Structures are given as C-alpha cells and as structure tokens.
Amino acid sequence: MNSRIRLVDAGAADAGALAAAGARLFAQAYGKYSEPGDLAAHVREYFGRNFVTAELQEPEVSYTIAYDVNDIAGFIKTRRGSAPDGMPAAEAVEVQQLYVDADRQRSGVGTALMDCAVVTAREEGLAGLWLSVWQDADWATAFYESYGFEKIGTAEFWLGRTCFMDYLMWFALGGAGE
C-alpha cells in the first residue's frame, strides 16, 4: 500500500467529508450503469450529510476512512447485526460499502480497509463478514474473491426503478458460528 495512506476511524466531525466522498465514489463506480434521476435520488438518500451523521451515531455502524495525505482515497462502512438467511452464521459484520477512488484502485487501499474490518470482526468474536455486490461489477467481485469471499447466494438491489441482481458473499473468520 502507498505509504502516504493512513486509516482513520470516522467520527461525527467527518460526516460532511464522508457524505461528499460517498456521493462522488458511488457515482464514479455506478453512475454509467444507472438512470441519472435514480442515481441522484439514491445519492441524496444514502450519502446525504444528515444520513451519514445519523449513521455515525449508531453503535452498530462503523466507517473507516483511507486518507491519501488530506484527500479521501476510499472508505469502508460496516454494520454489526443479524446476517440474512442463508449465511453460515446468524451474527456477522456486513460490509455495506467499500469504495476506493478510481485513481487509487489496485494500490492496496481496498485491502487495507478490508483488513481493518476483519481485525475488528475478529476482536468482536464474530464468525465472518458478508456483503452483497452487483453481479455485473466484475472489478468488485474479483477483488472480493481474491480477498477470500465466497459467493453463497443472490439478492435483489433496487436503485430507483431498476433492479440489479447482487451476489451475496461470505468471508469466514473461523471460530464462532462455524
């Protein structure tokens, strides 16, 4: 990983920067595959400052930001709680968002962020991590598989009026729940 990258656990003071980065990075990753109005509504709802501020106050939600000097190079958002039916364990960490700036991909930022989530899940004694990823996002699926996630099912993801099919993926930590 780039030696200029530093990981920081996000707090309330980071809400504005996280909201802006989330909107930018989500649009960067999925904008060309989405209807503009649906994309804009999704970004307003899930990457708005008020939404991010509220999530930062939830004890089960964590954000870790990867900074490259003073710029956000990426971030990971995790949520502790019940895993959906079909997962190997009832309690796990969901990787709800993992975004890395396109100019910084393949530089170790995503791996560093995922490593951070894995360490936290292990410290909490959880059995694994799970996530959903769009089936046509080959770049993301390849990253998760190379990290050690396995496809174990599918789910629908609605972005406005468009239904995207996602893979459900699982990463076993060993120990509890297995």
Image (tube, rainbow, N blue to C red):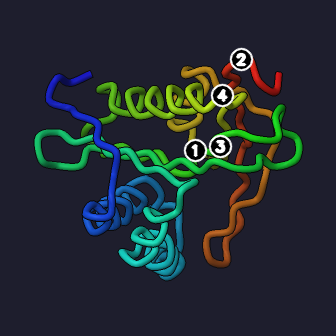
Amino acid, disc 2: Gly
Q: Earlier in the sequence, mark 1 or mark 3?
A: 1
Labels 3 and 2: the sequence-earlier one: 3
Mark toward the viewer: 4 or 3: 4
Q: Quadrant of the N terminus?
A: top left
Going by the numbered disc 4, the residue's amino acid type is Gly
Residue at the image point whose x is 40% and y is 34% from the top = 113
Q: Which amino acid does label 3 sit on?
A: Leu
Q: Where does the image place residue 175, in percent across and percent down from the top left?
A: 74, 17
Question: Which amino acid type is marked by label 1?
Answer: Val
Answer yes or no: do the residues labelled 4 and 1 have beta carbons within 8 Å? no
In the figure, 8 relative to 21: above or below?
above
Task: Characterize the local packing of mark 2: few (<14), some (14-19) or many (20 or more) Cα atoms within 10 angstroms.
Answer: few
Q: Tell me how far mark 4 sits from mark 1, CA to CA.
A: 16 Å
Residue 102 makes an appearance in the image: no
- Ranked by sequence position, the earlier of labels 4 and 1 is 1
Instruction: Report the residue marked by disc 3.
Output: 131
Sequence order check, earlier mark of 4 and 3: 4
Front-lying residue, 72 or 141: 72
Q: How far apart are marks 3 and 2 (CA)?
A: 17 Å
The residues tagged by marks 2 and 4 sit, at their Cα atoms, a distance apart of 9 Å
Q: How crowded is mark 1: few (under 14 residues within 10 Å), some or many (20 or more)?
A: many
Tag shown at residue 95: 1
> Dot 2 corresponds to which residue?
174
Query: Judging from the image, what secondary structure is the residue with disc 3 in?
Result: strand
Helix, strand or loop at disc 2?
loop
Classify residue 21 as left or right of residue 36: left
**C-alpha gap between disc 1 and disc 3:** 5 Å
* Residues at circles 1 and 3 in contact by the CB criterion of under 8 Å: yes
Query: What residue is pinned by disc 4?
Result: 125
The answer to which quarter of the image holds residue 174 is top right
Instruction: Give the answer, above or below, for where 147 lies relative to 27.
Output: above
